[in-house]
Image (cartoon, rainbow, N blue to C red):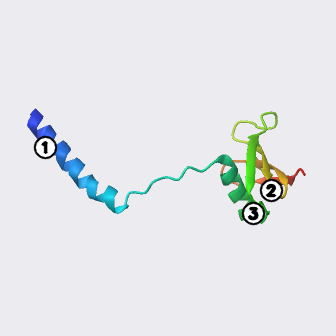
Amino acid sequence: MSAPRYFAIFLFLLLAAMPLERSGLIATAVAETVKDILAAQIRSQGIVCDKPRRAIRDAKRSKPDYEVWILTCENATYRVSRYPDLAAKIERVR
């Protein structure tokens, strides 16, 4: 292919994508923090976590494919142990 053909294909693809961006059909990812993800997970398991403040990874207890986090919420502090694709083990620390 010659250079004008590549340019024409590029312009076609560029113009084809423009209406999607203007109409809002292209989804934009909302940045979630670890504390928000952990809080949502423990809430789904029936634990109350009002306003998550911070999440700190416990390096001593964590292993490959097994993460341990200390999640501080407004009402309590929890130790959240997670294996991938399983329910978290939740212990109330304070």
* Labels 3 and 2: the sequence-earlier one: 3
Residue 68 picture location, percent across and down: 77, 43
Q: Is residue 43 above or below residue 64?
A: below
Residue 3 picture location, percent across and down: 11, 33
**Mark 1 vs mark 3, CA separation in Å:** 54 Å
**Mark 1 vs mark 2, CA separation in Å:** 57 Å
The amino acid at mark 1 is Ala
The residue singled out by tag 3 in the image is: 45
The mark total stands at 3
**In the rendered image, is residue 11 in sight?**
yes
Q: Is residue 21 above or below residue 7?
A: below
Indicate which disc residue 8 carries.
1
Q: Is residue 86 above or below residue 66?
A: below
Taking the view exactly as shown, the residue that stands out farthest to the right is 94
Q: Residue at x 73, y 62 (%)?
A: 43
Indicate which disc residue 38 carries.
none
The amino acid at mark 3 is Gln
Q: Could you say whether the residue bearing mark 1 is in a helix, strand or loop? A: helix
Callout 1 touching callout 3 (CB < 8 Å): no
Q: Residue at x 75, y 50 (%)?
A: 53
Residue 6 found in image quarter: top left
Callout 3 touching callout 2 (CB < 8 Å): no
Q: Could you say whether the residue bearing mark 2 is in a helix, strand or loop? A: loop
* Labels 1 and 3: the sequence-earlier one: 1
Q: Residues within 10 Å of mark 3 (few under 14, many from 20)?
A: few
- State which mark lies toward you, 1 or 2: 2
The residue singled out by tag 2 in the image is: 74
- State which mark lies toward you, 3 or 2: 2
The amino acid at mark 2 is Glu
